[in-house]
């Protein structure tokens, strides 16, 4: 199949070259000097370590960053190193977003920090794991679990890394399930308003999340880049796992049907329609095609019978078993339990210098959710095997060599 790669419009290309030659800077880009932190006396921007570069370092050195490498993106329970994990996904988001940001003259450090941190609170087993965990939390407390909200919680509450408001906001407002034709930055007055948005997401769920728009152009770029990074890559993985055939005929035309051309054509379209503006915009053709591509991915990949049968018959009941076992240990204050030894003590150590926060006073269900969300796929499976050696639910990975 012949691939079609779009190019920047000549007028836009000439404007970019001219503006660079004249050292014109984008007046709408985020400034390191404007970074807002809970503790303003720490992590100030310097020539050696600009504000958002500090946030990148904080995220990269967080213990949970390592766990990206064994958290499934879409396809769980495959022994196949060619399938995308979240560790690769966040790098792809960062790469795509920085390419767009470089052409639009945005703050690349801020883009990278948001991109690398946006899924750090994601559950094992992709969006299925997220959905099952939210169902359990909601049944017990009435609150909703969403990975974007939890990613912000990990950085701001559980590890208190003094991450800038601009990065936390970009992470909170990323929404790869809800595409827009325009992304106009939404002003955020400070941490008080940010905390109200967090609260609304817990109590209202999707209606509150769907209203979120990042406060910076950089956050808007990461949000659309999240979709660009997975829409074609998931098709590649679906071929690898034999969910679809390599010659499967998707219908999107303008943005293309294969990963490489989809990335190129969407990046080009965004730059052509956003350069010099205070918002990010897609052409109607690109937006319509992106929406079609996403709908087709859901129909033929994400909601395929084989994929969901595995999640529903095994993963869902296993998460339920582990959830209530851990909840019982937290409620009974069983200090010999796994959750005390391998999670609570770990969080308490990370918070040892913050006397104003007592983790054990958190609602027990929230502590359980924090722990399960932190797990990789293999970690969860191993824990389930330890806690329930006689469980009827067993996991069998699909081999590299399975036909």
Image (spheres, rainbow, N blue to C red):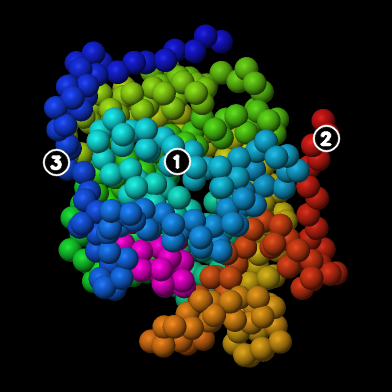
Q: How many discs mark residues in the rendered view? A: 3
Q: Name the N-terminal-most of marks 3 and 1.
A: 3
Q: Give the range drawn in magenta.
A: 151-167
Q: Which residue is drawn at 51% across and 60% down?
A: 61
| Alpha-carbon span between mark 2 and mark 1 | 31 Å
Q: What element carries label 1?
A: helix
Q: In this view, does 84 lie above or below 239?
A: below
Q: Is mark 3 on a helix, strand or loop?
A: loop
Task: State the mark number for residue 402.
Answer: 2
Label 1: which residue?
Answer: 93
Determine contact: label 2, label 3, CB under 8 Å: no
Q: In the rendered structure, does residue 210 fall within the stretch colored magenta?
A: no
Q: What element carries label 2?
A: loop
**Which tag is nearer the camera, tag 2 or tag 3?**
3
Looking at the picture, tell me which residue is in the foreground, 306 or 175: 175
Residue 84, by quadrant, is top right
Q: In which quarter of the image is the C terminus?
A: top right
């Amino acid at each position: 199949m012949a691939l079609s790669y779009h190019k920047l419009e000549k007028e836009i290309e000439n404007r970019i070259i001219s503006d660079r030659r004249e050292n014109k800077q984008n007046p709408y880009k985020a400034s390191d000097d404007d970074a807002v932190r809970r503790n303003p006396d720490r992590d100030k921007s310097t020539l050696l370590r600009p504000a958002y570069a500090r946030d990148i370092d904080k995220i990269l050195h967080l213990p949970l960053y390592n766990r990206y490498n064994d958290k499934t993106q879409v396809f769980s329970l495959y022994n196949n190193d060619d399938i995308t994990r979240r560790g690769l996904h966040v790098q792809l988001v960062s790469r795509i977003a920085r390419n767009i940001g470089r052409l639009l003259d945005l703050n690349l450090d801020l883009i990278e920090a948001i991109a690398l941190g946006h899924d750090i609170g994601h559950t094992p087993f992709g969006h299925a794991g997220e959905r099952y965990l939210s169902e359990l939390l909601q049944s017990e407390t009435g609150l909703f679990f969403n990975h974007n909200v939890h990613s912000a919680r990990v950085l701001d509450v559980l590890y208190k890394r003094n991450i800038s408001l601009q990065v936390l906001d970009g992470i909170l407002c990323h929404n790869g399930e809800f595409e827009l034709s325009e992304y106009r930055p939404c002003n955020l007055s400070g941490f008080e308003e940010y905390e109200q948005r967090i609260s609304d997401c817990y109590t209202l769920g999707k209606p509150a999340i769907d209203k979120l728009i990042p406060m910076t152009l950089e956050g808007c770029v990461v949000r659309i880049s999240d979709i660009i990074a997975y829409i074609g890559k998931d098709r590649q993985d679906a071929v690898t796992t034999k969910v679809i055939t390599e010659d499967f005929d998707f219908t999107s035309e303008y943005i293309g049907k294969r990963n490489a051309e989809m990335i190129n054509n969407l990046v080009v379209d965004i730059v052509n329609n956003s350069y010099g503006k205070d918002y990010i915009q897609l052409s109607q053709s690109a937006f319509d095609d992106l929406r079609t591509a996403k709908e087709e991915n859901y129909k033929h990949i994400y909601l395929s019978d084989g994929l969901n049968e595995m999640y529903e018959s095994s993963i869902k009941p296993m998460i339920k078993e582990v959830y209530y076992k851990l909840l019982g240990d937290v409620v009974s204050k069983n200090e010999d339990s796994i959750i005390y030894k391998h999670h609570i003590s770990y969080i308490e150590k990370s918070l040892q210098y913050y006397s104003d926060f007592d983790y054990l006073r958190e609602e027990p269900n929230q502590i359980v959710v924090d722990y399960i969300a932190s797990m990789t796929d293999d970690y969860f499976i191993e824990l389930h095997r330890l806690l329930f050696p006689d469980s009827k639910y067993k996991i069998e990975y699909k081999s590299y060599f399975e036909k």
